Amino acid sequence: MKKLVLMVCLFVLVAASPVTATPSTAVWIPSTDIQPADKIHFGVDNYFTAKPLNAGEATGAFTTPTYGLTFGFKNGEAGFDYVAGQNDPLYFNVKFRLAGKAPSDLNVVAGVYNIGTTKTTNQEVKYLLTSVTDANNWRYSLGYGVGRKEALGDDNKMVLASIDKQLNDKWWVCVDYQSGKSALGALNLGVSYAFAPNASVLIGYDIYNDRNLKKTFTTQLDINF
């Protein structure tokens, strides 16, 4: 009951913020992380344009508000997003661990995200992702994904890659990349700070492969219950 009350309070506090929530991610792409069984993750991702979208226009939010929850279960996680301002606002995601337990193992996950409820909103990106962590605690991830052409266009196949490191119990850094010039293609840099054992905030910068899209700054709040 206490968890439910806390989640409702957090929802109200961020209701005016533009956010994006997805499965457990690096900065932008999915990661090989899985939420622990019987745990709940609440994420708040804000994206702001670095420059005005058009001449004379004030710098503003890149996305409309999105609210998401992710639930952990044995060897997997599943979640949903609610995108405010859309006629069909619900999106779903699921991820399964196929191999690996320790960070030094070859970790393999498979999943699908951005499952919309209509033909136009259903990007349905299916992906397979692997990662391994070296002796210096750098994690290297590489994978491949395919989304629906009806939602993403012809450039619907994408390489996923990232390098990240947990510097200590507070700080984490990452660079990730998603290929292609669809709305999902981007190079992203981020640094995260854990201000509580179950909560962290990330600040990042996003450079989109489609040069018609403005670069964005991102702030991401992550809380585990």
Image (cartoon, rainbow, N blue to C red):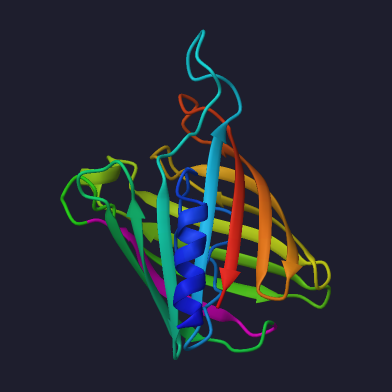
Which of 35 and 138 lies nearest the eye of the viewer? Answer: 35
**Extreme residue toward the left, this view:** 119
| Residue 194 spot, x, y in % from top left | 74, 66
Where 194 falls versus 88 (above or below)? below
Residue 127 point in image, percent of width and height: 40, 65
User: Where is residue 207 drawn, in percent x and y?
Assistant: 58, 36
Question: In the current view of this chain or complex, which residue is farthest to the top?
Answer: 56
Residue drawn at x 30%, y 43% as measured from the top left? 152
Q: Quadrant of the C terminus?
A: bottom right
Above or below 81: residue 186: above
Q: Is residue 57 above or below residue 137?
A: above
Nearer to the camera, 170 or 113: 170
Predominant secondary structure in magenta?
A: strand
Q: How many marks?
A: 0
- Residue 102 in percent (x, y) is at 66, 88
Magenta stretch: residue 106 in it? yes
> Could you tell me if residue 96 is visible in this image?
no
Region rendered in magenta: 104-116
**Up/down of 151 relative to 106, above or below:** above
**In the image, what residue occupies the spot 47% across and 43% down?**
16
Residue at image point 53% right, 51% down: 45
Q: Residue at x 54, y 45 (%)?
A: 46
**The stretch drawn in magenta includes residue 112:** yes
Whether residue 181 appears in this view of the structure is yes
Residue in the foreground of this view, choosing between 149 and 48: 48
Q: Quadrant of the N terminus?
A: bottom left
- Between 96 and 140, the residue placed more toward the observer is 96
